[in-house]
Image (cartoon, rainbow, N blue to C red):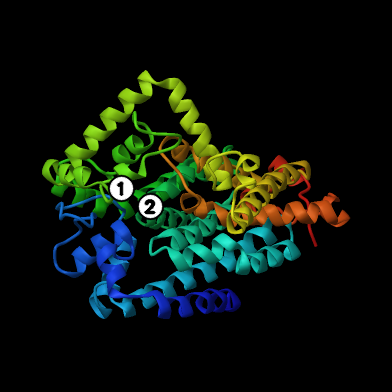
């Protein structure tokens, strides 16, 4: 964790000293929409105005946790100041460095101690894990940390009948929803997997699930109430789905989405947003998007295919088509993205071949988390919360290919003691690959 922090800070700080200037801030303040909301909070205008061109009033564009964190930094060190920029980047480096611990824990818990340690060291220098904490003043690094934590908690919790653990599990998910609502796309399958060993004890299982769900609901309730009071509409988490859906599904989409129509870039859309106010604007965009989806199914399927490619490879077209004319930096990006994705999926396949029952939550993240982005639009930044899980699988894929020990079924690296509720379960009979 210490080395990961040092690596990120050493890369960021010289660039920060050379490039940070007031002209850049006036053109586009760091943090984009989340930075504008944080500035509004720090300046006493409340949770409002995510656009850089015009003030638009109250917003529910984001979940509140990261904008309020950034607003607190602005309040203490100045709105869009160089000191605030430095502080928030240091926090991002801390979030990214802490992710090493959960990467190591997940790898160790499923595949053995060596796999966990190897994955943590790879995280120290993994290009996406270094790039996004340095470049993006957003919840990206915190979301990656939190999803890794949630997967680790699910592995630890599975089959437990300890009420305190289930209450803490609900609290972790509610915090995740307040950081990045996209994380809760995997809540239903992970929660079901965690409680499944208790299926033969219906009453205790329902009691634990209900208690966890109640804590989750209580955790998001203040934000939901705020949104209802402000907008007179039930908005449990955030309001911008209609816009994101429309940006990826409208007549002007060339292959995946239309970033130039985003109200942070289009003057026309920004003023329309301000004049209509947020909720009517989002509702109109959602209606337009669904109308387009129903009337252009072939185009929508083509867009989804491009988004699938971009989500996993970070590029819009086929790698072979781009390679010849690509500069060396793009070639490195293509090579890394293709290798990382291929190794991750191979790791998942090898985990199942090794009868790794604990690989199920990793598969759930890989399969379910991207679904919304296939429908709207995506980027490697949106995928980043998955990268810790992908890394654990990629490291296991390499180990499985080069090490006979990784391929040899043996004693469980996850035992009945780790899953206390499964002592009478058939899972106890299934060996899980131990990579030692």
Q: Earlier in the sequence, mark 1 or mark 2?
A: 2
Q: Can residue 201 be seen?
A: no
Residue at 42% over, 63% down: 136
Quadrant of the image occupied by residue 425: top right
Say if mark 1 contacts mark 2, CB within 8 Å: yes
Task: Using the image as rendered, state which of residue 172 and residue 180 is in the foreground.
Answer: 180
Task: Using the image as rendered, state which of residue 214 and residue 269 is in the foreground.
Answer: 269
Q: Which residue is mark 1?
A: 237
In the rendered view, would you say 327 is above or below 366?
A: below
Q: Give residue 177's mark.
A: 2
Specify whether 375 is left or right of 152: left
Q: Position of residue 408 (x, y in %)?
A: 86, 51
Q: Position of residue 82 (x, y in %)?
A: 32, 78
Farthest residue in the top direction?
295
Farthest residue in the front direction?
325
Neighbours of disc 2 within 10 Å: few (<14), some (14-19), many (20+): many
Mark 1 secondary-structure assignment: loop
Specify whether 243 is left or right of 302: left
Q: Position of residue 352 (x, y in %)?
A: 73, 42
Q: Position of residue 247 (x, y in %)?
A: 34, 38
Q: Is the N terminus in the top left, top right, bottom left or bottom right quadrant? A: bottom right
Specify whether 172 is left or right of 364: left
**Alpha carbon separation for disc pair 1 and 2:** 7 Å
Mark 2 secondary-structure assignment: helix
Q: Is the C terminus in the top left, top right, bottom left or bottom right quadrant? A: bottom right
In the rendered view, would you say 213 is above or below 280?
A: below
Task: Using the image as rendered, state which of residue 113 and residue 213 is in the foreground.
Answer: 113
């Amino acid at each position: 964790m210490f080395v990961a922090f040092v690596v990120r800070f050493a890369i960021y700080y010289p660039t920060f000293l050379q490039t940070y200037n007031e002209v850049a801030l006036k053109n586009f303040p760091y943090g984009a929409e989340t930075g504008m909301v944080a500035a509004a909070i720090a300046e006493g205008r409340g949770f409002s105005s995510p656009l850089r061109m015009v003030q638009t009033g109250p917003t529910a564009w984001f979940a509140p946790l990261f904008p309020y964190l950034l607003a607190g930094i602005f309040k203490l060190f100045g709105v869009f100041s160089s000191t605030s920029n430095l502080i928030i980047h240091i926090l991002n480096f801390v979030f990214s460095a802490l992710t090493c611990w959960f990467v190591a824990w997940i790898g160790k818990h499923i595949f053995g101690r060596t796999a966990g340690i190897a994955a943590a060291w790879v995280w120290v220098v993994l290009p996406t894990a270094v790039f996004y904490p340095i470049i993006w003043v957003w919840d990206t690094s915190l979301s990656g940390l939190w999803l890794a934590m949630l997967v680790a908690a699910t592995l630890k919790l599975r089959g437990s009948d300890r009420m305190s653990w289930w209450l803490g599990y609900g609290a972790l998910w509610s915090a995740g929803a307040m950081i990045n609502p996209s994380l809760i796309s995997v809540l239903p399958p992970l929660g079901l997997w965690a409680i499944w060993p208790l299926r033969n004890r219906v009453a205790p299982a329902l009691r634990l699930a209900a208690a966890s769900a109640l804590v989750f609901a209580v955790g998001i309730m203040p934000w939901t109430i705020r949104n209802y009071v402000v907008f007179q509409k039930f908005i449990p988490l955030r309001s911008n789905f209609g816009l994101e859906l429309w940006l990826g599904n409208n007549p002007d989409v060339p292959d995946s989405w239309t970033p130039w129509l985003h109200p942070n870039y289009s003057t026309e859309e920004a003023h329309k947003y301000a004049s209509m106010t947020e909720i009517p604007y989002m509702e109109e965009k959602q209606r337009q998007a669904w109308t387009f989806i129903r009337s252009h199914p072939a185009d929508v399927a083509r867009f989804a295919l491009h988004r699938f490619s971009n989500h996993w490879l970070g590029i819009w077209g086929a790698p072979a088509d781009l390679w010849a004319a690509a500069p060396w930096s793009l070639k490195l990006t293509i090579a890394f993205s293709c290798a990382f994705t291929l190794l991750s999926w191979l790791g998942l396949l090898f985990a199942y071949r090794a009868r790794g029952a604990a690989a199920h939550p990793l598969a759930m993240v890989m399969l379910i988390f991207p679904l919304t982005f296939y429908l709207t639009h995506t980027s490697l930044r949106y995928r980043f919360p998955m990268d810790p899980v992908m890394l654990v699988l990629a490291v296991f894929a390499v180990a499985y290919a080069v090490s006979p020990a990784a391929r040899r079924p043996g004693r469980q690296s996850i035992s009945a003691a780790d899953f206390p509720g499964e002592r009478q379960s058939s899972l106890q009979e299934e060996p899980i690959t131990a990579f030692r």
